[in-house]
Amino acid sequence: MPRFHDFFLFTLQKLCLQLSFFNLSLLLKGFPVKETNKLLKSIQKLNEVDYSEYLKRQKQDIVKYHLEHNTFYQNFAKSANASNWERLPVMTKRDLQQPLAQRLSKGYSKQNIYKNKTSGSSGDPFIFAKDKFCHALTWSIFMDRYQWHNINLNTSKQARFYGIPLDKIGYNKERLKDALGNRYRFSVFNLSDAELEKNIVTFKNKAFEYINGYTSSIVQFAQFLRKQNIILKQICPSLKLCIITSEMLFENDRKLLEEQFGIPVVNEYGAAELGLIAFENRSNQWIINNEDLYIEILDDNNNALPLGETGRIVITSLYNKAHPFIRYDIGDIGALSENSTLKTPILKHLTGRTNDLIRLPSGKKAAGLTFYYVTKSIIEDSGRVKEFIIEQITLHQFKICYVSETELTKEIKRKIKTSIDNYLETGLDVLFERKNTIQREKSGKLKQFKSALQ
């Protein structure tokens, strides 16, 4: 029976590849990908002046549409004027935590939408909807960006480092989608040496073209390859690219991945409810998706910040008629590059989530990843620690949980404490707890900083 099951999947996979499975699956589900591919190309051909007019028109059209057809948005933005953008209210995830049926535009129901749920990494999960044209446009943009690096979503085999539902139905559904979608899923829940050794065998036997998945899990695999003195492309020559998503990518981690994989590393930034937000080009510029999204960087008073300044990332979905995402605070903090133009906005950096702030006794606030980053280099230089997270327990007390074969030495702990004093402030109480494993979220993501004060 297992052999028949494997043969069935293999035969079905070959058939799907011959039919360009990805495009075919979208068309069969009613997603008009041919139309959205055509629209995408037309937007990309616009010059700077024409793009400015396009953006102005599209922003007004989506606001006007929801003011006329969406009761939720009518009540949320009671005094809104489609022509006065800066006066439109900013919506948050908590504003959207009500039954989906109450947020859908007239004419939309579960029969003619794409429905999904956010991961909850912000602490505020909710169910959302996209109309089928909007969702098809999302995938047109993904396909376009991957082609920047010669990756074809229809034919390129993917090594996938993602979480997977552990219930039987959800698990089997994802495995079937993996088989049909020409991808192989590696575990992000089991990162033991024995499991990582199996990963190496799989890469030797499968012609992967690219790696895609969570930063922390892929970095763990790269660290294991370094210990084994293995360059991944040497055992899997078909590899072209590694795409990192869902978690922060630090420069020293990028360097490790490029050295141990022997391929370029690309940083992807996206969200389930919006699609692709930014993607690195061949020049390592993090190019914002400006075809179906409009990105603003706002201060705490909802005023736009100049290029280069860090603030809240607020995003508008220009084509989602089923559900409004207008001036939507995604919960991330970042900045646009000073080299950005309206037609080509560039993401300068992400510095974490708004709910990941460190609150210190002096009243000072800092991004949670600051604490993680200042500790990271010292811990990794020790050569002992596989991975770690930081928890804020009280205003004064922090705990560093780490996975290591041996305890950190007193000297390493002293260096960490000194670094924290220099970057944050003195007088903080730092605890250390060695663990066998660090528990990930249900999605399989690793949250590097957690605060009990939120």
Image: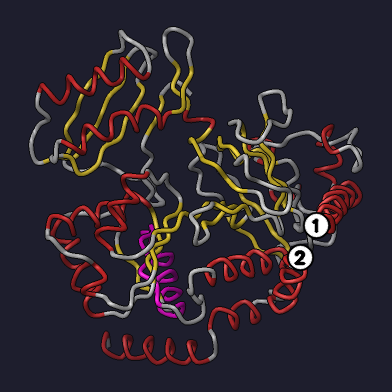
Task: Give me the residue at 36% from left, 23% from top.
Answer: 392
Is 142 located above or below residue 18 in the figure?
above
* Residue 154 screen position, x and y as percent: 51, 80
| Residue 282 on image: x %, y % | 49, 62
> Between residues 202 and 116, which one lies in front from this camera angle?
202
- The image's mark for residue 8 is none
Q: Distance between the residues labelled 1 and 2?
A: 7 Å
- Residue sitting at x 69%, y 40%: 296
Are the two marked residues, 1 and 2, in contact with CB atoms closer than 8 angstroms?
yes
Q: Which amino acid does label 1 sit on?
A: Tyr
**Residue 175 belongs to the span the image colors magenta:** yes
Residue 74 in picture, x, y percent from top left: 86, 41
Q: Is residue 216 above or below residue 112?
A: above
Q: Which three-letter amino acid code belongs to the residue tagged 2?
A: Ile
On screen, residue 223 versus residue 100, left or right, reads left
Q: Which residue is drawn at 92% across and 42% down?
A: 83
Q: Mark 2 points at which residue?
A: 43
Residue 360 figure quarter: top left
Q: In this view, does 265 lie above or below 210?
A: above
Determine whether, in the image, residue 393 is placed left or right of residue 245: left
Mark 2: secondary structure: helix
Left or right of 296? Residue 205 is: left
- Locate the N terminus and report the quarter of the image it occupies: bottom left
Q: Residue at x 60, y 70 (%)?
A: 144
Callout 1: helix, strand or loop? helix
- Specify the segment rendered in magenta: 157-181
Task: Name the colour scheme.
Answer: secondary structure
Query: Which residue is label 1 attached to?
Result: 51
Residue 354 painted magenta? no
Q: Which of marks 1 and 2 is nearer the N terminus?
A: 2
